[in-house]
Image (tube, grey):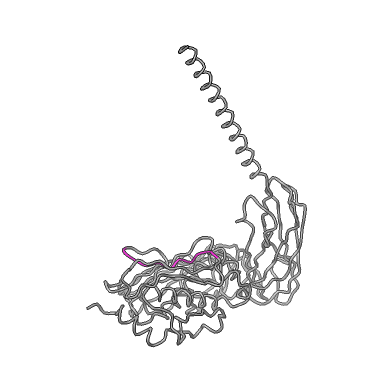
Amino acid sequence: MKGIESREEAYIEVKLLRTLLKALVGLLVLSAGAWAQQLEAPDLVVTSVRLDPAFPAPGSTVQIIATVINRGTRTTNDVFALEFKADRVQIGVRFLADLAPGQSLDIAISWEAKPGETVFRVTVDPFKTISELDESNNTVYKIVNATNNEFTEADLVVRRVSVEAEAFTAGEPARLVATIANIGQGLAAFVPVGFYIDGELLTIETVRESLAAGQEMTIAIPWTVEAGERVLRAKADPSGELFELDEANNSWADYVEFAPLPNRCAQVVSLEFASTSITLLEEMTSWPTSEVMSVFIPAIRRQMERDYEGVNVRFYLRQPTGIFSTVFFSPENRIPILGLAPLDFGNFRKDDRGFVFVGSFHANRGLRLAPPELLAILFAKVASHELGHMLGLGHNPNGGIMNAQAEINPYLVVNEKFRPEDLEYLKRILPMDCR
């Protein structure tokens, strides 16, 4: 009997193993099917944006022509939109349907050219009605100049910006030197060059000599060195006075840190941005990524420095070394909450982490009509508020930056400051001089 029982047990084990194998194979088949279904979807892409005429005069009627293609594996199953914006103003929306895999369409709208530089932002499926293989490739930017100047086939780029100084220390005289090159095929005369620190325009200087094709030269301005990490930037033809082959390659930016470094009493603060937050900021400003990174975000940091003037805080856009606190700009939408941070009275922790919810700003469509420079200040005020909590400040019923009810109107926060009692506390716990 024992031998029979062993054979029966072995048979049952084999049968059970076969059942388990069948179930496993079934799961694999289902998983493969689900994966295949995920891969079966449309993928809408704006492949190009062009103008007719290509080089318009101010006031002329221009056709803006966008090419849209479905690079996915299925036909679009719903109506979708194609949105055209000139700077931050919507100038047209076209609705499309039934775009098959591999099919492309040219969609045109009319626009009256305004003088100078305009940034076009063309987005397919802005209202997210189509489930796509890739949602990150739906927008294309194009910079257009409208001028009465002659098109010479020039193409200006900034090779670099350097600093010339005897001492790279705050308060010392220096020169910002930009190297400008013409990589086009024609002559560029009287090229204006804008110099910026942390996104803020210092001045515009003009290259007095003509730049022939393939030629480069330098232009310099005086500057007084500022302490801390600075974003140095130069842009050729910042006002869009010259026609060029490519209007998107005119600027150059880099991070440079100047002495003195933070002392042992300082609170070091890193301003960090999620990549998806950068995308939301692009949508709010209608600026391409390069402009958001080299102009908008540095402007936030610069305003926070003004808010904390006289307080021993050092702000960084690149991750610093050592111990530091972080203000993280999250893509989350937590309306009505704009930010969140721990209350660390006395600033006992030097590595606190606070949040600014970019998604909460993005959800307020009214903010998309505000000038980007005011938006940067609004973000800075909320970040300064959250950092205030991390340094030990509670809500102040008397108002100011630590007001419990955050002001969402960017026009009303420009002159908002810390109340004297709050500023006195900050200076006491973070004195400029170590003792």
Residue 84 at x, y = what percent?
A: 70, 66
**Magenta span has 227?**
no
Residue 428 drawn above or below residue 152:
below
Residue 221 at x, y = what percent?
A: 43, 78
Residue 383 at x, y = what percent?
A: 46, 73
Image quarter of residue 313 = bottom left
Q: Considering depth in this image, is 405 or 234 the residue closer to the camera? A: 405
Q: Considering depth in this image, is 168 or 326 the residue closer to the camera? A: 326
Residue at x 77% of width, y 52% of height: 98
Residue at x 46% of width, y 12% of height: 3
Q: Does residue 82 appear anywhere in the picture? A: yes
Q: Is residue 168 left or right of residue 179?
A: left
Q: Is residue 99 left or right of residue 194?
A: right
Residue 280 at x, y = what percent?
A: 57, 65
Q: Considering depth in this image, is 42 or 408 the residue closer to the camera? A: 408
Q: Quadrant of the C terminus?
A: bottom left
Magenta residue span: 322-332
The total of numbered circles placed on residues is 0
